[in-house]
Amino acid sequence: MTNILLMRQEILLISSILILLIATIFRAQGAKKGIDSLAIVLFAIVTVAGFLPSETGNLFGGMYQLNETTLLMKNILNVGVLIIMLQSSAWLNTDDHKKNSTEFIIILLSTLVGMDYMISAGDFLMLFIGIELATIPTALLAAYEVKKVKSVEAGIKFVLLGALSTGISLMGVSIIYASNGSIYFSQISEMMSITNLNVLGMLFFFSGLAFKISLVPFHMWTADVYEGAPIPVASYLSVISKGAAVFVLVMILYKVFPVLQETWTMAVYILAILTMTIGNLFALRQKNIKRFLAFSSIAQAGFILLGIIAGSAMGMATVIYFVLVYIFSNLGAFGVAGAIYNASGKEEISEYNGLYKSNPKLALLMMLSLFSLAGIPPLAGFFGKFFLFTSAASQGYYWLVIIAVLNTIISLYYYLIVVKAIFITPNENAIPYFKSDNMMKIGLSLAAVGIILIGFLGGIYDWVYALSWGV
Amino acid sequence: MNMLNLLIIVPVITMIVINLSKDYKSARIIAAIGMGSQLLLSAFLVFSYLNAREAGETAAMLFTSDHVWYESFNIHYAVGVDGISVSLILLTSIIAFAGVFASWEIQNQAKEFYTTLIVLATGVFGFFISLDLFTMFLYYELAVIPMYLLIGIWGSGKKEYSAMKLTLILMGASALLLVGIIGIYFNSAPDGGQLTFNFTEIAKHDIPLAAQMFFFPLTFIGFGALGALFPLHTWSPDGHASAPTAVSMLHAGVLMKLGGYGALRIAVYLMPQAAQEMAWFFIILATIGAVYGAFSALVQKDLKYINAYSSVSHLGLILFAILMFNGIAFTGAVLQMISHGFITALFFALIGMIYSRTKTRDIYQMGGLMKVMPVLGVSYMIAGFASLGLPGFSAFVAEMTIFVGAFQNSDLFTRVSTVLVISSIVITAVYILRAAGIMLFGPIKNKEFLSLGDAHWFEKVSIFLLIIAITAIGFFPSWLSNMISESVGLLVERFVVR
């Protein structure tokens, strides 16, 4: 007996989208406020509902699977999206965007539906539909500011490169199907053997996800798209889109390709080193805060691979935990950048000089977020990174860990450069004091609370660990 | 409530109250009250510790408490102290208290200054009470990172360069340390038990030798960089020269001791075989550090550089003593940590006070300062005499113990390096007396200096507190060295006599 309520999360999201559509029709012409407050309320309900206990099981003959792990992953993404929606509310209510704010939110939620299906997929077909639903509308989001050339450029770049990577990925799926005769994960993993064809298929498929996670050498789009896209979209790409792809990658590698562990371990090893190092080295020279955070997020993706490589329950747990931590840290940084952009239109790092004197709270949150990204205790990022390194070390990859810790020092350097600009460099024309709206304040406070508290609550990791499994 | 947790709670409360205060005047009073209660707490801790030992407590660690933090990694929040950590906690609280008075006149963002300073102190206290490597590492980094802001915002000279250099070298070293700690964790149960971060548990087993050989150098270098291990000491002179007074005091006085403590407690104690195998290499580095630091101090013109290089030299002595692997040398190492902590803090406090008056730290521009500021001048001479190891001061006791310990090892290599290290003491006398002579005596070179005032009351509090500590240890070393050597005895059991 199939229970359609297993898809509770997706159904709630789709109903919210429909409600928002209808509400837009009835909204008075020229209304002062956009539709976003309703959207936030609806989405908050969805988020809270996600934490209610749920049955687990399969739908449609195993195409759709819900278990506690996937539920946890969806909840983590929901929290991130909620923070982003809070942080983008003020931006959506500016005169340029008020008219189309419904579109923005609906597209945003649609991609989230896609990600939920990605995570819950039980076969390659469902997974592929999920990936497409999550990718194509994202290009629309990136090109949302149609009047800006850079934004449109970002959208086109994203959709072209995204199509290419999806194509390669689909090629991989075809090869796997050809070689194993099934698209169901459970059947493939049973039939899988170490053949060249299987390895090729896996690597092709891997590269499609690597594009979304922006692993080197699939990262070329990242900085340009982040720079061109509006800040809420850039933050969405950097945490939610990336987080969902990481979740799928770790589950697929552990669930579908355990037989090829030796191969993908090697691939992950090499990509981890490349991604960390190149992301960090490019971040050193960035002047624009969005490009800066783009390269920093590439480097962080490299660290995530250290968890994946372990291939154990500890590996999966540290990856999920790190994504959770990373969502809060990165949204703290992007949130402050967004608040400053809304108030002053500035997004160069040199324009942040002297920010602490004029806007101490924002400056402090920016420092906390960057320190958390750099892995400074007692902030959440420290715990996330420590555990990732521990999980790589648990399989004896000590040299990889040494390369990773040296990379954290490079990253500390560039994070400190921003901290220096904000706290130390004197500036007569610092960005003047401004007040953010309440939604932004809630969004930033949520990020701050997460950054400060997660590490102290050891139970969160243990909970994640209990729901994880290895190869 | 465990007494040790109060050592963390009091600073945290102080920080919160400071940020609620209105202006710099109330902020500094709150900071003084907070650090004062911390000092009383530490004194009480020493008394309770001594009483407990008197009453026949034989456990290695006293006042322990243990809470599970991360169950799946078996990470605990475990605290406890022995004679070594108790004495270092006392050192920290005295210097932190003196540091607040030494920075009494800071008005630029005073709240932030005291908050950051107390974050640093909290990290140090936490480090000394931790029994769990994870918690210890957390506190270690917590103590290092505030240095960036403290030097960068409140420093002087090329502060941005110094702050970045210091932070990157120390955090780089701590990154190696992290690998070392993770490596120790995964080898903590060679016979198949549960992995643990608790070092008292780890010490019950022998980590496999192959693992020791890989992780000992990482751990030792990681801690050694903070203990000014040559050639990773280069952050120290620049950092100290740019740092504000109280930060120099805390950093040279206490923070650098984290390196020595960690090298002894973690690197050497947990991996004794590898430590003995590789000792020759690090003995060479420590010897070079001790001698090279002394010679560098000899040619410096800037008072802070003189004292910073002198610290490199004296800390080389600590690392040297740790690598001698016997109880007397270990006791000497800890004594030297405490003695050097007080003396160097006194030096930096005095230098800061002199600099705030003369606006220069170049000794050749000063002269005859003894006439205009006798209290500061006499105190500088006391610090100098203490530093060059005159009997009656703490350094004499410490250095004597180290050399007695070092001479227990009778092989030629150790003998030669011991003699070389002792020669650094002679050079110490030269550079201390040279600086003091040029600066304090002779005619007054700059007429403007004639109008300078002597120490204020708050400066005297800071100076006298430190002088009392130095002379107290000098005259009554036995209670301290007994307390330390008792605990050191348990560490030494792990070493075979060469």
Image (spheres, coloured by chain):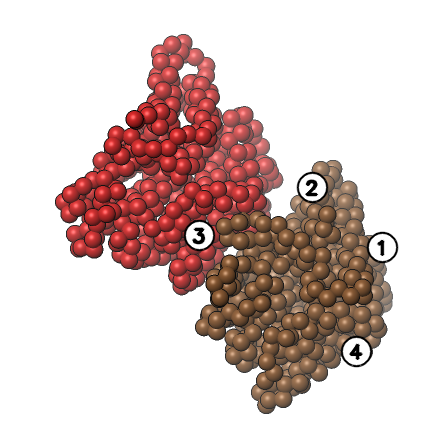
Disc 1 is placed on an element classified as: helix
The residue mark sitting in front, 1 or 3, is 3
The residue mark sitting in front, 2 or 1, is 2
**Whole-Å distance between the Cαs marked 1 and 3?**
52 Å
Give the residue furthest to the left. A178
| Image: B117 above or below B186 | above
Q: Which residue is mark 2?
A: B16
Q: Residue at x 50, y 64 (%)?
A: B189
Taking B460 as reference, is B7 left or right?
left
Chain letter of disc 4?
B
Disc 4 is placed on an element classified as: loop
Q: Which residue is mark 3?
A: A388
**Whole-Å distance between the Cαs marked 2 and 1?**
27 Å
Q: Which residue is mark 1?
A: B457
Counting every numbered tag in the picture gives: 4
**Among the two numbered marks 4 and 1 on one chain, the one whose residue lies closer to the N terminus:** 4
Amino acid type at image mark 1:
Trp
Question: What hue does chain A carry in this figure?
Answer: red
| Image: A55 above or below A319 | above
The answer to which image quadrant residue A171 occupies is top left
**Do marks 2 and 3 share a chain?**
no
Q: Which residue is mark 4?
A: B390
